[in-house]
């Protein structure tokens, strides 16, 4: 696994407890029937959000794989969120049994925020997209034709918006390379709304 070193100072900050550094791994959520062959983003900035709202930059200006193949060093301490921004469209290539899917998406995710948590070692998954976010595209590939979606295409904005709105950060306790609501440490508004929908379904069952 590739290690991407932090490009910013990770020393103690006033009001933040010191802990052991952890590892951050970026992934996009899985969709049944699709295999992610490659995923890459050009990171403008990745920041941890302190509970007073101040930011500590973890990395900037580097290529960030979105397939879990590289780690970023996350400074230990007490935090309330994580934000990331990209310099250019992210590139995702998928395959199915029938065809291929290429996505080039302009994405600027909302921050993942929540209650204070202590980062003291461990691996933290940074997951974009939400469960089955490419279900419609997976179904379309069954026809056997390759699909490409880039900025300006009719489907682009809806897919980019899904990635913009859904970011979840936490430790992948079950090792399935995806974060359930119970595994989430901090999350964006849309991911939190997914939690509420799941709870309502459980109450009705």
Image (cartoon, rainbow, N blue to C red):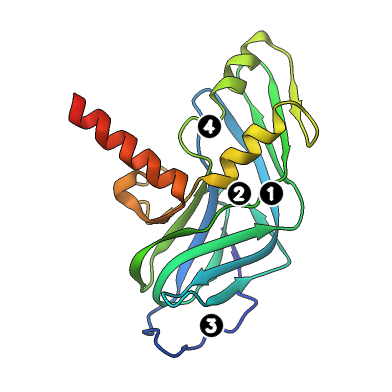
Q: Secondary structure at mark 3?
A: loop
Q: Earlier in the sequence, mark 4 or mark 2?
A: 2
Q: Secondary structure at mark 4?
A: loop
**Residue at point 60% right, 60% down?**
84
Identity of the residue furthest to the right in this view? 152
Mark 4 lies on residue:
133
Image label count: 4
Name the mark nearer the viewer: 1 or 4: 4
Task: Say if residue 120 shows up in the picture.
Answer: yes
**Residue 199 in the figure: left or right of residue 167:** left
Mark 1 lies on residue:
40
Spot occupied by residue 103 in the image (x, y as percentages of width and height): 71, 35
**Residue 33 in the figure: left or right of residue 63:** left
Label 2 with label 1: CB-CB less than 8 Å: yes
Q: Secondary structure at mark 1?
A: strand
Spot occupied by residue 91 in the image (x, y as percentages of width and height): 72, 43
**Taking 34 as reference, is 166 above or below it?**
below
How far is disc 4 from disc 2 in space, using C-alphas? 15 Å
Task: Say if residue 173 shows up in the picture.
Answer: no
**Within-10-Å neighbours for mark 2: few <14, some 14–19, many 20+:** many
Task: Write down the quadrant of residue 96 in the picture.
Answer: top right
Mark 2 lies on residue:
66
Q: Earlier in the sequence, mark 2 or mark 1?
A: 1
Q: Earlier in the sequence, mark 2 or mark 3?
A: 3
How far is disc 2 from disc 1 in space, using C-alphas? 5 Å
Name the mark nearer the viewer: 4 or 2: 4
Mark 3 lies on residue:
10
**Residue at point 33% right, 45% down?**
181
């Amino acid at each position: 696994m590739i290690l991407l070193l932090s490009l910013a100072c990770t020393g103690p900050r006033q009001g933040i407890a010191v802990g052991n550094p952890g590892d951050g791994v970026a992934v996009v959520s899985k969709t049944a029937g699709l295999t992610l062959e490659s995923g890459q983003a050009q990171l403008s900035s990745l920041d941890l959000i302190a509970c007073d709202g101040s930011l500590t930059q973890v990395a900037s200006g580097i290529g960030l794989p979105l397939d879990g193949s590289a780690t970023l060093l996350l400074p230990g301490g007490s935090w309330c969120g994580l934000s990331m921004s990209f310099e250019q469209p992210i590139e995702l290539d998928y395959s199915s049994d029938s065809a291929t899917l290429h996505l080039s998406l302009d994405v600027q995710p909302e921050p993942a925020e929540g209650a204070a948590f202590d980062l003291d070692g461990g691996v933290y998954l940074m997951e974009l997209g939400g469960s089955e976010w490419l279900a419609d595209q997976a179904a379309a590939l069954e026809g056997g034709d390759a699909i490409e979606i880039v900025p300006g295409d009719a489907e682009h904005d809806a897919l980019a918006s899904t990635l913009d709105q859904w970011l979840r950060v936490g430790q992948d306790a079950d090792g399935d390379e995806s974060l359930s609501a119970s595994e989430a440490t901090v999350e964006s508004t849309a991911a939190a709304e997914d939690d509420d929908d799941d709870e309502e379904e459980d109450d009705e069952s």
